[in-house]
Image (spheres, helix red, strand yellow):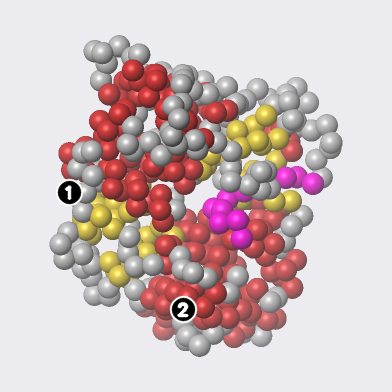
Amino acid sequence: MVVEEGTPKSPEAKLGLEVEDLWDVQEPQLSPTEKLNACFESIPVSQFPQTSSSEVIEIRSDASLGEAVRLLSQNKLLSAPVVDVDAPEDSSWIDRYLGIVEFAGIVVWILHQVHILQFLPPNHKFLAAAASGMSSPRYRSSQPGSPKTAGNFFELLTSSDFYKNTKVKDISGTFRWAPFLALQPSNSFLTMLLLLSKYRMKSVPVVDLGDKKIENIITQSAVFHMLEECVDLQWFKSWGSKKLHEIGLPLMKSNRIIKVEEDEPVLQAFKIMQEKGVGGVPVVASGGGNKAVGNISIRDIQFLLIAPEIYKDYRSITAKNFITAVKSYLEKNQKGSALMSEMVSCRKDDTLKDVILKLDSLKIHRIYVVDNEGKLEGLITLRDIISRLVHEPRGYFGDFFDGILPIPQNSRV
């Protein structure tokens, strides 16, 4: 590949130019999707740009839950691999890691604590006051199954010895094993893209068998950024210049979008995300209808744990109260966050290029399609976009899921 003077030199741009070179030598009778499949199958994931930091962020198994939340939040991560500090020095990679902990797992843990609280006696330790907001007979009868918390619940929770003493390894049952899939550096880009799309992985670790450690983690945000660097290249224009409806997007129509009403408990939103395996839900106005007033992402659970004091003046933490409190917190402490901004949306007549540029600039993974009145018409995620670019050839994975990497003879798994 020859990179001419003046050509962007970012790793993602160079990668896009390599795809361009491969695209030009594909058989002319192939469809654009078949050409792109062949291009990505020819590029190993070892060429995917490293994470922004010089090292992959790892969390020790003996770290407290609070430490893990802070580490994820500070590094703007959805998840991180957990290193087993008790593993022998000569352990294989699969024994060195307990799995990958993510905000979704922390949601599971919190929901479990709320469930336990509902059945505790009123005088039980530190959480009696918090329990009163979600265990009243009137609330239980009106909102069966919806976890509701008083405004001071998370302030009490995060200041308790129980929270401070809970270790990451103690919530290992919430980790996304499924199984703990990782790629070797020689695996292809196509494999990685299919795992992120069709097989719904949120990130893909790349393991160095020699060092027995994760050398890179390919995230959805990183893939969006790669696509953003390619939007003006010839190979991408087959899709990027087309309007969303011309390439069959959105795949998910409004009647299938999982949503919550603004007066529902915020934990109900997180519970739905965990149960349905989705990364976010739109918040719609009370009384039905399809007009979205906000969005809550799975990673927003961090704001219940790193700034629990901001809810103490609320009688209960509804979805609306949660968004209002977090927006105020971000305005005072940060420059802002796309995660808690107004609804990020697009129209069916927008081009795929427009959508990718917007998603990459805001560092988000989903965008809602709305009509002229702001009513929901659909949802587009990275998985949907990848599904328009590449496809899984028949028998492609074979016995891949029987073990993505060879399991060493001395493995405990």
Q: Residues within 10 Å of mark 1 (few under 14, many from 20)?
A: few
Question: Would residue 148 be seen by someone viewing this image from the given angle?
Answer: no
Numbered badge on residue 349: 1
Depicted 16 relative to depicted 139: above or below? above
Depicted 227 relative to depicted 70: above or below? above
Which residue is the site of mark 2?
Answer: 328
Queried whether the magenta region covers residue 78, the answer comes back as yes
Front residue of 318 and 33: 33
Instruction: Name the residue: 46% across, 78% down.
Output: 328
Residue 163 quadrant:
bottom right
Q: How far across and how far down the image is residue 384, in percent?
A: 33, 41
Numbered badge on residue 32: none
Q: Amino acid at mark 2?
A: Ser
- Secondary structure at badge 2 equals helix
Extreme residue in the left direction = 372
Depicted 386 relative to depicted 152: above or below? above
Q: How far across and how far down the image is residue 405, in percent?
A: 62, 25
Classify the position of the C terminus by image quarter: top right
Instruction: Name the residue: 27% across, 73% down.
Output: 285
Q: How far across and how far down the image is residue 57, in percent?
A: 66, 48
Queried whether the magenta region covers residue 147, the answer comes back as no
- The number of numbered discs placed on residues in the rendered structure image is 2
Cα–Cα span, label 1 and label 2:
34 Å
Residue 240 quadrant:
top left
